[in-house]
Image: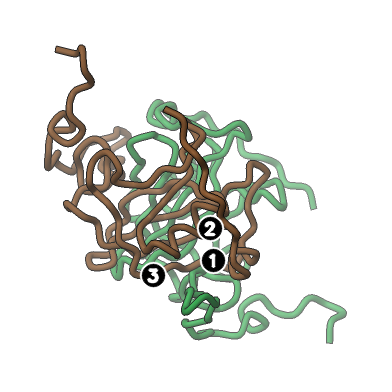
Chain colours: A green, B brown
Amino acid sequence: MKETLPNVDSPEWVNAIKFNDDGLVPAIAQDATTGDILMMAWMNPEALTLTAQEGVAIYWSRSRGKLWRKGESSGHQQRVAEIRFDCDADVILLKVEQQGGIACHTGRRSCFYRKLVDGEWVTVDPVIKDPDAIYGKPEGES
Amino acid sequence: MKETLPNVDSPEWVNAIKFNDDGLVPAIAQDATTGDILMMAWMNPEALTLTAQEGVAIYWSRSRGKLWRKGESSGHQQRVAEIRFDCDADVILLKVEQQGGIACHTGRRSCFYRKLVDGEWVTVDPVIKDPDAIYGKPEGES
């Protein structure tokens, strides 16, 4: 399915951001209420502009090479309460309201669900909802 | 001044992390107590290994091309309470106790001190300590 990219003129404030050689900047999503760090993804100027315009997090999917409207499959949108950037102007921070309480594609609240304990990674956060129930199984799979 | 790189053997758990083409992974530092996001920097395998071994945040400075022991000039070390990584295994999260309550080289608590308000970036967090007082003025400067 081919996607027509929206024709987005970046507003002036986007010029303050230093995008990397791939034209991307990392964006951290933090739960505006609990302070939990939910995920980190990437944005190009269009994604950042649209995120501010539409008030929901829109990233750039590096694997798919297209805009990624967070929640387009899962319904787990992120309503943007605040946009910040850092002293070096090369990282974005979004404070968001996480719809459904699930940010991770594994069905967990946060993507950071594994913790180093005595030299081993331990999964410390539960799956809230089965990913199959979130995304549906692809056709043809049993 | 030449730095001798420590000879660090990466432990097994480091192999779970996907470093990028430059051999680096982004690392988010979050205040373990308040939940504030303090900064984002980069780590190579040695930095990540030493961070876990020494219990203080050690990054890789891309500009200086060497290990960066956070706080080596400022005294504002980050004691590491927790190390997590994300579902894609390409982002590290550190929960830290920020010594001096200042993470940013501008003398602010967090590097994310500017916020988008009505299409403009506005500085919303105060300077806690003058950077000249933190780092001292370089010799020869008035």
Which residue position holds label 2?
B91
Residue A87 in sight:
yes
Residue under the image location 47 percent in, 68 percent down: B84
Residue A20's place in the image compared with B67, above or below, is above
Residue B135's place in the image compared with B44, above or below, is above
Q: How crowded is mark 3: few (under 14 residues within 10 Å), some or many (20 or more)?
A: some
Q: Which disc, if any, is residue B82? A: 3
* Secondary structure found at label 1: loop
Q: Are marks 3 and 2 on the same chain?
A: yes
Residue B8's place in the image compared with A102, above or below, is above
Residue B117 in sight:
no
Question: The disc labelled 1 sits on which kind of residue?
Answer: Asp
Residue B111 point in image, percent of width and height: 30, 43
Q: Who comes first in sequence, dot 2 or dot 1?
A: 1
* Secondary structure found at label 2: loop
* Secondary structure found at label 3: strand
Q: Could you give the CA–CA distance between mark 1 and mark 3, rounded to whole angstroms?
A: 13 Å
Q: Residues within 10 Å of mark 1 (few under 14, many from 20)?
A: many
Q: Which of marks 1 and 3 is in front?
A: 3
Q: Nearer the viewer, mark 3 or mark 2?
A: 3
Question: The disc labelled 3 sits on which kind of residue?
Answer: Glu
Which residue position holds label 1?
B86
Q: Quadrant of residue B72?
A: top left
Residue under the image location 33 percent in, 69 percent down: B81
Determine whether, in the image, residue A84 is placed left or right of residue B83: left
Chain at numbered mark 1: B
Q: Are marks 1 and 3 on the same chain?
A: yes
Q: Could you give the CA–CA distance between mark 2 and mark 1, rounded to whole angstroms?
A: 6 Å
Residue B135 point in image, percent of width and height: 21, 33
